[in-house]
Image (cartoon, rainbow, N blue to C red):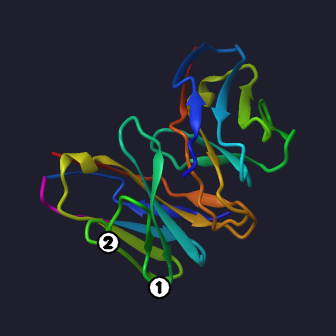
């Protein structure tokens, strides 16, 4: 299994600002994923991040709003740009395991935008 | 896009009682179904991955069944304990590998009354 940490664990931000969320894994992984869960909604995939290539975004998510970095095999960041109250969510990173279907999740970052 | 529905949305159960809840998903192009348990402020924890019609998996007091022909899975908890309080998420995969996307339902929030 993989141990994943995220920073910050929670934050309260003002409208119009940006927040960068960090995801650190204790082992090298090829694929990392970023999800968000808005209040009352499902966990929704934002993008897939492979090391050495640009992130692939899901429908409804764009790079200008959610830029992602993946500088090495153990680390990734997600930035939530120009925040509005609708961005208030829990943001999680996850990594693909070595066995089929394995995915491990971080503890999440709880973001409130005022 | 997979449409995943979970019911009920929330459930309150007396300690010691058994309970179950449902996940329904499209039966066409089925690859695998995940069940996760997500406690507040913690990482979602993988409970089961099921791939075959008729699969039945068990982990302690928790078990799950899978019907891929009709597109549903049940999760059962026997003799509920306070530590079972969590949101239970089901999520079908859209492929065979650990890098495949998993599409989450909105979850069943389970609360156990002591």
Mark closer to the chain start, 2 or 1: 1
Disc 2, SS: loop
Query: Looking at the magenta stretch, what is its main secondary structure?
Result: loop
Chain letter for the residue marked with disc 1 in the picture: A
Q: Which residue matches tag 2?
A: A63
Q: Is residue B93 left or right of B12 when viewed as pictured?
A: right
Residue drawn at point x = 72 percent, y = 38 percent: B71
The residues tagged by marks 2 and 1 sit, at their Cα atoms, a distance apart of 13 Å
Residue drawn at point x = 60 percent, y = 24 percent: B82
Which quadrant of the figure has residue B12? top right
Q: Say whether mark 1 and mark 2 are on the same chain.
A: yes
Which quadrant of the figure has residue B68? top right
A67 within the magenta span: no
For the image, the number of numbered tags is: 2
Mark 1 burial class by Cα count in 10 Å: few <14, some 14-19, many 20+ = few
Mark 2 burial class by Cα count in 10 Å: few <14, some 14-19, many 20+ = some
Please report the bounds of the magenta region as a residue range. Answer: A15-20
User: Is B114 placed above or below B82 here?
Assistant: above
Chain letter for the residue marked with disc 2 in the picture: A
Percent position of residue A43, x then y: 47, 47
């Amino acid at each position: 299994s993989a141990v994943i940490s995220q920073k910050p664990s929670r934050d309260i931000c003002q409208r119009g600002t940006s927040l960068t969320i960090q995801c650190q894994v204790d082992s090298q992984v090829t694929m990392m994923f970023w999800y968000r869960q808005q209040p009352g909604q499902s966990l929704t995939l934002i993008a897939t991040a492979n090391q050495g290539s640009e992130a692939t975004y899901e429908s409804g998510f764009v790079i200008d709003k959610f830029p992602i970095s993946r500088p090495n095999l153990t680390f990734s960041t997600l930035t939530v740009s120009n925040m509005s109250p609708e961005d208030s969510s829990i943001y999680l990173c996850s990594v693909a395991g070595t066995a089929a279907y394995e995915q491990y999740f971080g503890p999440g970052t709880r973001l409130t935008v005022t | 896009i997979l449409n995943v529905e979970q019911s009920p949305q929330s459930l309150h159960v007396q300690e010691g009682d058994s309970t179950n809840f449902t996940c329904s998903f499209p039966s066409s192009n089925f690859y695998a179904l995940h069940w996760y348990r997500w406690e507040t402020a913690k990482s979602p924890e993988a409970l089961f991955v099921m791939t075959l019609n008729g699969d039945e998996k068990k982990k302690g007091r928790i078990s799950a069944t899978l019907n891929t022909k009709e597109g549903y899975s049940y999760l059962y908890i026997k003799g509920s304990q306070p530590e079972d309080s969590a949101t239970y998420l089901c999520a079908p995969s859209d492929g065979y590998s650990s890098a495949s996307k998993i599409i989450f339902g909105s979850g069943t929030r389970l609360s156990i009354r002591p």
